[in-house]
Amino acid sequence: MKAVPARSRGVNETVAAAATEIPTDADLAFDELYRRDRDAIHAYVAGLLRDRTAAEDVTSMAFERAYRRRRSFNPKRGTRRAWLFGIARNAALDELRRRGRQATLVAEPVDETAIPPEQGAEVAIRRAALREALSTLAPRERELVALKFFAGLGNPEIARVIGISETNAGTRLHRVIEKLRRHCDEAA
Amino acid sequence: MRLREREMPLDPQVERELEAIDRAIAGEPVDPDLEVLAELARALREERVGTEPGFAAELDQRVADGFPRAGRLAGSHRLVELRQKLAGVPPRRILARAGAAATVLVVAGVAISQSGEIGGGGDGGTFSAQPAPDQPTVVTPNQPNAAAEADGDATGLSPGRDALDGRRTARDLHYSGSERLQGLIGPGAVSNFNGSAADVPPAQRKVARRVDLALSTSPERFRTAADGVLDVVRDHRGYVLRSNVSGGDPDAPRSQLGHASFELRIPAAQLSAALGDLSDLGHVVSRTDGRVDITSRFVSAQKRIAALEETRQNLLRQLAEAVTLTEQESIKRRLAIVEAQLSAAEDDLGAAQQRVQLVPVSVSIDADRALADGDDAGGWSLGDAVGDAGKVLSVTAGVLLVSAAVLGPLAILAALIWLGAQAVARLRRERALDQI
């Protein structure tokens, strides 16, 4: 018996899904890097620039550069995180250069109201002293603080980002901590 | 300096304090004597600037969209995509691909430049034609086809005319001057005989050619080639003026290999075909084609003949009217002199005509052991292919060497400039930190 081809019945809509690119390893790695280090990068750049608006611009620029170069990352030259912070550092330093040509950088005023009142006067005084101590740091010292405490990088990664040895990074970091501690003690 | 720093271990106390800082940041307990330090680390950690939710959401969106570039045209977008793709490719791969592309281009260029040389076995010798720019080729009324003449097929009268043998019969005495000249140089040329050589139009100018042809052949084919010259001459109704053939033993030492030279005369109308046949006898080493304009020689001979003819006619009239025997004898003597001069002038014109009609062709053949038997037969053989391939490879190598000599220093210079620019940029960035 010969089968007669029949038109489908009851179908009045065709749903077509848009073709999407299959993400590559570089895409996936970048996505993971972004999700993990977005806040760290922003905190580091903000600590270096001391300007929230500029920090947001530079953070955005750094991630865009990293995205464009994501396929050229070479694992032999360090971790992906160090590579990303290197890009952010270059972007931040470019911003500093640009600003240096235009006007002297002015530190953000300390927002006293940012300290919760329930922490008490002693805590407020200690934090004010710390901020005062931070403002006395040289830019290179402040960068170390930003990388270590704001971005949460380990000493090997700090060494890789700023281009010094790990021992040197540890020594410099210790010196900065000592300096801050002395300043805070004197203030107390 | 960095090496020294790496070699020097950290002070144990410093190392202990750094570890305590790391533990404090990670929220882990530290030794009681380092609690103050841990407290400082925790306080510093709290100083970090948080990300604004609005900025975070905006950045998340841009990342999800792949950082689109706003306000770009379609063309430039494709350019950007291409640049991104290139940026994503490791430099080693780009270099490899660029090198491969450059090699293909160089080889293609060499192949194109060599295409005129390769192919056609036996014709790799030099060829030079030397027509004088101020000596145009000749087209007589007998040969109106200018294109055919350009190949040497028409340079004047056809051979075998009565005037060429230089003999005059008694009947010639009754020819008028114009008839005689027409018999000598053909119709059409006579009309210009009263003018100077410069007045002769290009189509009627007389050009004498000369061809020197040097061939080489394998020792085994030397004798055949030498005999072939005679066959070619016979086939094209020419003749051999001189010939000299020596050697020809294929087993003879190199210094005694065969050598042959021929001095030929080939009718101008047959020259092109004859040269083609002669070239097929061996490998053409060189060919020289020379041309000389001898129109002035023609014109002066014509003028001289016309003047003598007129004088002769006058003398004949005087002879018919002479009454005395003495007068008749005197006129006959003068007539004999004029006729002798006329004969000489006609011989001169005939020789000039022969020079135009019969082209001197010098052919030399040398036996060359480097030519394998059969390679010089005119076809494109395996030996020719090997030779051409070697030629292409040697030229390619030369081009690559010259390219490397030019591009090498440029690449080094570019690399130095790039490294310098990188160093300067790094220095400027580092300096920015010190200038805050």
Image (tube, rainbow, N blue to C red):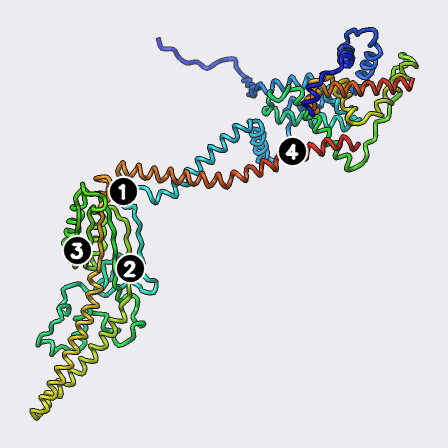
Do the numbered discs 2 and 3 sit on residues whose CB atoms are within 8 Å? Answer: no
Q: Is residue B220 above or below residue A107?
A: below
Q: Answer with mark 2 or mark 3, whichever residue precedes in sequence.
A: 3
Q: Residues within 10 Å of mark 2 (few under 14, many from 20)?
A: some
Q: Give the distance between the C-alpha atoms of the residues marked 1 and 4, in whole angstroms.
A: 57 Å
Tell me how many marks there are. Answer: 4
Q: Position of residue A11 (x, y in %)?
A: 52, 14
Q: Answer with mark 2 or mark 1, whichever residue precedes in sequence.
A: 1
Residue at which label 4 appears: B422
Residue at which label 1 appears: B121
Q: In the rendered structure, find residue B243 and report the number of the disc placed on it.
A: 3
Residue at which label 2 appears: B290
Discs 1 and 4 carry the same chain letter: yes
Residue at the location (28% across, 46% down)? B123
Q: Residues within 10 Å of mark 3 (few under 14, many from 20)?
A: some
Residue at the location (58% across, 32% down)? B83
Q: Give the distance between the C-alpha atoms of the residues marked 3 and 1, in whole angstroms.
A: 27 Å
Q: Answer with mark 3 or mark 4, whichever residue precedes in sequence.
A: 3
Q: Which-is-in-front pick, marks 3 and 4?
A: 3
